[in-house]
Structures are given as C-alpha cells and as structure tokens.
Image (spheres, rainbow, N blue to C red):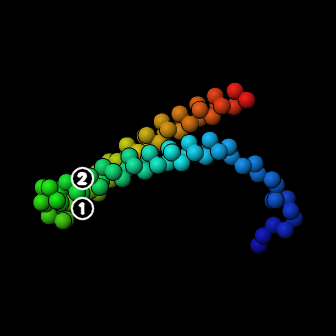
Amino acid sequence: MTDQSGAGNAHHPKPARSNTITIFIAATVLALVISVPAIVVSIVTYYILKMNLVLTLMASLMTLFLAMGFGYKFSGKLAKIQRTYNNDDDNNK
C-alpha cells in the first residue's frame, strides 16, 4: 500500500556536487584497498609460485578477509575525514 496523501512528496535538496565526488572517490579507494591485495595474491601464488588452484583460492580468500577487516577500519578514517571536510565547508558558507 502506498501513501497517496502527498505528504511524502517533499522536495529533497540535491547534494552538493563536490560532496558527491568525494563520496565516489572514497568508495573507489575503499574498493581498491579491499580487492587489489586478493587479486595480487592470487596471481602471485598461481602464476609465479605455481601453486595448486585450491591453495591459491584459500590464500586469496584469507587475504580478502584480512583486507576487508583493514577496509572496515580504513572506512572509519575516511568517514572522519569526510565529516571534517563537510564541517569546514559548512563553516565557510
């Protein structure tokens, strides 16, 4: 059932373009921090060290979980930097 009263159609302001770009940059950096180490480990273990595929997958999964834990901590730091940036931007207006 949907709300037909019109009260839910309030105008939502568009986010500032610089704020949207910083969110995209932070998300891209976070995705790279999480994915690149697992990709590098899988390539090194399979093609350079010539390990078994099962061992390569296990090493890549362990690296991925470690990178996700590091990415979780890194995302808190990125959020703090972004909040500081937004507060400074609001104070300058």
As shown in the figure, which amino acid type bears the numbered disc 1?
Answer: Leu
Could you tell me which secondary element the residue under label 1 belongs to?
helix
Q: Residue furthest left?
A: 50
Residue 37: x %, y % from top left? 30, 49
Which mark's residue is nearer the viewer, 1 or 2?
2
Q: Quadrant of residue 1?
A: bottom right
Q: Any mark on residue 81, and which?
A: none
Q: Does residue 82 sit above or below 47 in this rendering?
A: above
Instruction: Identify the residue position indicated by label 1 in the image.
Output: 57
Could you tell me which secondary element the residue under label 2 belongs to?
helix
As shown in the figure, which amino acid type bears the numbered disc 2?
Answer: Val
User: Mark 1 near mark 2, Cβ–Cβ under 8 Å?
Assistant: no
Q: In this orientation, which residue lies closer to the viewer: 68 or 44?
A: 44
Point 24% across, 53% down: residue? 41
Q: Quadrant of residue 73?
A: top left
Q: Is residue 39 left or right of residue 23?
A: left
Quadrant housing the C terminus:
top right
Point 86% across, 62% down: residue? 6
Q: Is residue 53 left or right of residue 31?
A: left
Q: In this orientation, which residue lies closer to the viewer: 19 or 68?
A: 19
Point 53% across, 33% down: residue? 81
**Marks 1/2: CA–CA distance:** 9 Å
Question: What crowding class fits label 1: few (fewer than 14 Cα within 10 Å), some (14-19), or many (20 or more)?
Answer: some
Instruction: Identify the residue position indicated by label 2 in the image.
Output: 41
**How many numbered tags mark residues here?**
2
Mark closest to the chain's N terminus, 1 or 2: 2
Residue 52: x %, y % from top left? 14, 64
